[in-house]
Amino acid sequence: MINDQTKTNGFILSSVSLGCNTFACLISCIIFLIIIYHLYYNHIKREDKITVVLCGHIYLTILIYSSILISMNIRSILGDLYNQSFDSSWCIFSGYLAIVVLGMLYWNFLNQAFYRFMRIMYSQNRWFQSVKLYIMLPIIEIIIISILLCVLIPLNGIIYSPNDYFCNISYMNIPSVLSAMPIVYVCPFCCLLFIYMHITRFIHQQGNIQTLIIKQRQSRDLLVIQRILSIVNLLLILGIPSIVLIIMSLIRGEEHPLLARISYFPVSVSQMGLSIALLFSIPQLKNIVLNLNKTSKVTPVNRTIQGTIQMRTIITTQ
C-alpha cells in the first residue's frame, strides 16, 4: 500500500497530465482536420502534398496517442478518488496499443526524413516521389510494429498496475523492455541520425555542382530534417528521468509506486509541445494554417467570378 502523500502526488501528476493530453488532443484534432480540408479542397503541388500527407499522419498519431493517455489519466484519477479497479483484458490491450502508437509516432518522424532523403539522393526516381507510397508506408509500418511487439504478450510485458489503475509495460521485466526499446526508440532514432549525417555529407560533397535552385531546396530539406532530429532528441531527453527511476528500481529490486505516472508525465508535456512545435518546423504545414483565413475569403470571391462568367455566357448565347 502507498501512503496518503504518495496518493496525493499521484493525483496531481494525473491531473496535470490530463490537462496536457487534452490540449494536445484538441490541437492535433484541429490541425488534422485543417490538413484534410486543405488536401480535399485545394490544389497542392506533388512535393508539397507528400509533406502535408506525412504531417497528417503525425497529427493523427498524436491524436490517437493523446486519447489513450487521457483514458489512462481518467482511470488513475477515478482510482485515486474511488479506489476503483480497471483490471481487464481490454486494459491489457490498451497498454499494448499505447506502446504501438508511441512507436508509430517516432516512425512517422522518420518517414518525413526518409522522404526528404529520397528527394535529395534520388530526385529522378518518380516512384520515391509518389503520394501513394507515403500513404501506404505508415500502414505497412504499423502492421510490422504491431507484429514485432506482440512478443510483449507472452512475456507478460503488459501488466495492470494497482497503484496507477491502468495497464502499462512492466519496467521490471527486462526482456520486455529490451524487446520494445529497439523497435520504439532505438531503430527510428538511429535511422534518422544516419539520414541527417548522410545528407549533410552529400550536400557538402556536391559543392558548386548543383544549380542555385536545387541547392536552396536541399538546404531547406536539410533544415527540416535538422528540426525533426531536434524534436526527436527532445523527446528522448524528456524520457531520461524515467530511465533513471527504472535503473534505481532495478538496483533496489523494488519499483517506485509512481514510476508509471512519472514516466508518462514528460510524455504528456511533450505531446502538448510537439503539437505546436511541429507546426513551425514544417514550412508547408505552417503556410496551410496561416493561410486558412485567406483561402476561406478567396473561395467565395472565386465562386462569384465564376457565377458572373456563367451569367455572361448565358446572355451571350441568348
Image: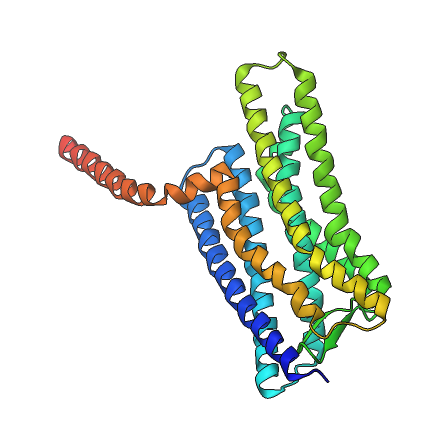
Quarter of the picture holding the C terminus: top left
Looking at the image, residue 56 sits to the left or right of residue 288; the answer is right
Image x and y of residue 111, in percent: 65, 42
Image x and y of residue 28, in percent: 50, 55
For residue 164, above or below residue 81: above
Image point (66%, 49%), residue name: 106
The one of 307 and 9 positioned closer to us in this rendering: 9
Q: Which residue lies furthest to the front in this view?
A: 5
Image point (57%, 39%), residue name: 131
Image point (56%, 14%), residue name: 211
Looking at the image, residue 267 sits to the left or right of residue 290; the answer is right
For residue 161, above or below residue 134: below
Where is residue 262, by image quadrant?
bottom right
The one of 257 and 301 positioned closer to us in this rendering: 257
Tally of numbered discs: 0
- Residue 95 in sight here: yes
| Coloring applied to the structure | rainbow
Image x and y of residue 138, in percent: 65, 49
Quarter of the picture holding the N terminus: bottom right
Image x and y of residue 48, in percent: 50, 35
Looking at the image, residue 308 sits to the left or right of residue 161; the answer is left
- Residue 139 in sight here: no
Where is residue 179, by image quadrant?
bottom right
For residue 217, above or below residue 103: above
Image point (57%, 35%), residue name: 224
